[in-house]
Amino acid sequence: MRAVLASVLVAAALAGCAQRQGGRAAAAATAVLASAQRGDGAGACAGLVPSAAQSLETEGRSCAEEIVKLGLRSGPADGGEVWGDAARVRVGADTVFLFRWGDGWKVAAAGCRPRAGRPYECRVRT
């Protein structure tokens, strides 16, 4: 009986940790999208992993200039799903993928839409 109770308590603690991490990932995702939506390109780019920010730097234009042009929109987010150091958060009709970065989360891909039988199509990607 004690072993069963201990197992239940461990599972509950792990679920609580996953929910907290999902909430943190969702907060990071919505912060990037909200920054882009209000025209704060520097703030939005600060929430991206470096390779995602670099992917937007083309033809002499900065990440900050380009991310606001993408039309990314923030909105209600689901609780997020976390798998180790990776997470997926749905914000409205879009999906955001994140990586654990230091003690927080950074966006690796944003403005992503599923495609039948193919990988997601993302406006921001690593």
Image (tube, helix red, strand yellow):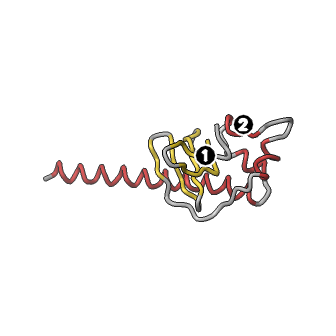
Pick the front one: 101 or 56: 56
Q: Which mark is residue 121?
A: 1
Mark 1 is on which residue type? Glu
Is 117 left or right of 70, judged from the image as shown?
left
Secondary structure category for the residue under label 1: strand
| 43 vs 74: above or below | above
Pick the front one: 42 or 89: 89
The first of marks 2 and 1 along the sequence is: 2
Secondary structure category for the residue under label 2: helix
Q: Residue at x 72, y 50 (%)?
A: 44
Disc 2 from disc 1: Cα separation: 14 Å
Residue 49 at what x, y percent from top left? Answer: 65, 39
Residue 83 at what x, y percent from top left? Answer: 44, 43
Query: Is the C-beta separation of discs 2 and 1 under 8 Å?
Result: no
Q: Residue at x 58, y 60 (%)?
A: 93
In what quadrant of the picture does the C terminus appear? Answer: top right
Question: How many labels sit on residues?
Answer: 2
Pick the front one: 71 or 3: 71
Q: Which residue is mark 2?
A: 55
| 126 vs 2: above or below | above
Residue 76 at what x, y percent from top left? Answer: 58, 65
Q: Residue furthest bottom?
A: 76
Residue 40 at what x, y percent from top left? Answer: 78, 54
Q: Residue at x 54, y 49 (%)?
A: 115
Is 14 left or right of 52, judged from the image as shown?
left
Mark 2 is on which residue type? Ser
Q: Residue furthest front?
A: 116
